[in-house]
Structures are given as C-alpha cells and as structure tokens.
Amino acid sequence: MNANGTRVAEAGPIPGDAPVADLVVRARNGDQRAWDAIVERYSPLVWSICRRYRLAGADADDAGQSVWLQLVDQIDRIRDPAALPGWLATTTRRECSRIVRAAHRAPPPGYVLDTDNIPDERTGTADDELLAAERHAALREALAYLSPPCQHLIALLIEDPPLPYAEISARLGIPVGSIGPTRRRCLNRLRRHPAVAALINPEADSQANRTPGRLAAVGCRV
C-alpha cells in the first residue's frame, strides 16, 4: 500500500546489490520487500550510531524505532533517494541526542560528543564502528552507480596486497599510463555521488575533496 493508501502490487525479487535509489522508489510505491531490504541494509548503521551515543537496551530500541517510523512518514519527502544513508545517519543522531537529553544526561554547554568523551577502553571501537557503517553504506551506493570499467578498476586498486599497475593493465586490457588518469576520473565521480557527499562536511571547503573509507588510499596511487 503506498502513501496514499492505494494497494500496489509488489515488483519482482530484489537483488542484494540493488541501488538504494531503486529501493526508495519501490518502498514509496508500497513494495514491502523494498522496505525489508532497506531495514536489513541500514540497521547496522542505525545501531552503530546508537552505540556511539552509549545507548543500549530500551533506549537504543526506542531510537531505532523512531528513526524507522520517521522514514515511513517522510520517505516521500526525501529529495534525493540516493542520499538515504546520510538522512538515516542524521536522523539517528538527532534521536539519540533527544533520548540523552530526556534522560537528564544532557552534556553541559560547549560539550561535543566525540570519542574523547567515552571514558572506557571501547573508545576506538565505538568510533570505528560508526565510521565503518556509514562509509560502507555510502560507498556501496556510490560504487553501484559507477560505470563497469570504473567499478572494475577500483576493485583492483583496493586489492590487498596491492596489485602492481602492470598486472592491472593486463587484467583490464588498458595501457599502464592510462590507469592514473582513469582512476582520478572515477574517484571524482565517486565523490560527487550524493551518498558519499553526505559524509563530507559541506561547511569545510578544505575537506571538499575527501573520499571516505578505504578508497581514500586509491587516490594516493599514481
């Protein structure tokens, strides 16, 4: 049933790598399988942010439930479906902050919630989990929109251990000298994708060319 209360026939099976924009469009049209796919794909992102705010048990459940209810209510108003990961991250942070304040654990004025304020040994883990979840979600969507040649090139460039350019050249059938320029074009397209742009601070011009996550290392290869 769609947002207007009209029952809509569900479309065919949803592949595991379906672009988030497609999932959002199908969910808007009442496809329950699309909703299930969205929740399954992005629940780790929501829960990692809850842990980042040190919520657990009922508090984390309340925050997560509120986020998904807001998505149901507002999915028709998300202007760019591909930016859903950023929307979910922002909404989850807002809900976590609300719960913290309601529980009289609001930080004093000027306090910034970051890993320096987590006193136990899980400081690094909390930050890593949040960053990994957000980056994974964003990069998954952005990579799906790249052309197949870009996808293949980036996949080879992030191999561990790194592959020599000669081997990449042989596998892709392209000159070694073209790998660097092609890499730059592919990364520029990746950075412009809304899902990746949502992870880049728009107020910091100096960070405008950052690429989140493991793919940042790709930009260092010349």
Image (spheres, rainbow, N blue to C red):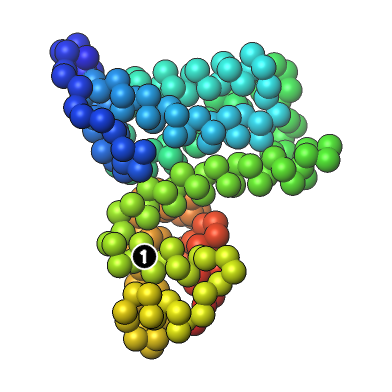
Q: Position of residue 167 (x, y in %)?
A: 45, 79
Q: Residue at x 30, y 67 (%)?
A: 149
Which of these two is toward me, 127 or 9? 9
Q: Is residue 7 visible?
A: yes
Badge count: 1
Query: Seen from this angle, which residue lies furthest right?
Result: 120
Where residue 13 sits, quadrant-wise, is top left
Name the kind of residue labelled 1 in the image: His
Q: Is residue 102 visible?
A: no
Q: Residue at x 20, y 22 (%)?
A: 10
Q: Check disc 1 and report the residue beneath it.
A: 152
In this picture, residue 36 sits left or right of residue 162: left
Q: Position of residue 61 (x, y in %)?
A: 58, 17
| Label 1 element class | helix
Which of these two is toward me, 103 or 48? 48
In this picture, residue 85 sits left or right of residue 114: left
Q: Name the quarter where the N terminus is drawn.
A: top left
Q: Residue at x 59, y 47 (%)?
A: 131
Where residue 88 sits, quadrant-wise, is top left
Q: Residue at x 69, y 40 (%)?
A: 126
Q: Crowding at label 1, few (<14), some or many (≥20) Cα neighbours within 10 Å?
A: some
Is 11 situated above or below 157?
A: above
In this picture, residue 76 sits left or right of residue 208: left
Q: Position of residue 117 (x, y in %)?
A: 77, 39
In this picture, residue 91 sits left or right of residue 143: right
Which of these two is toward me, 116 or 84? 84
Is 8 situated above or below 187?
A: above
Q: Position of residue 22 (x, y in %)?
A: 26, 38
Where residue 68 sits, quadrant-wise, is top left
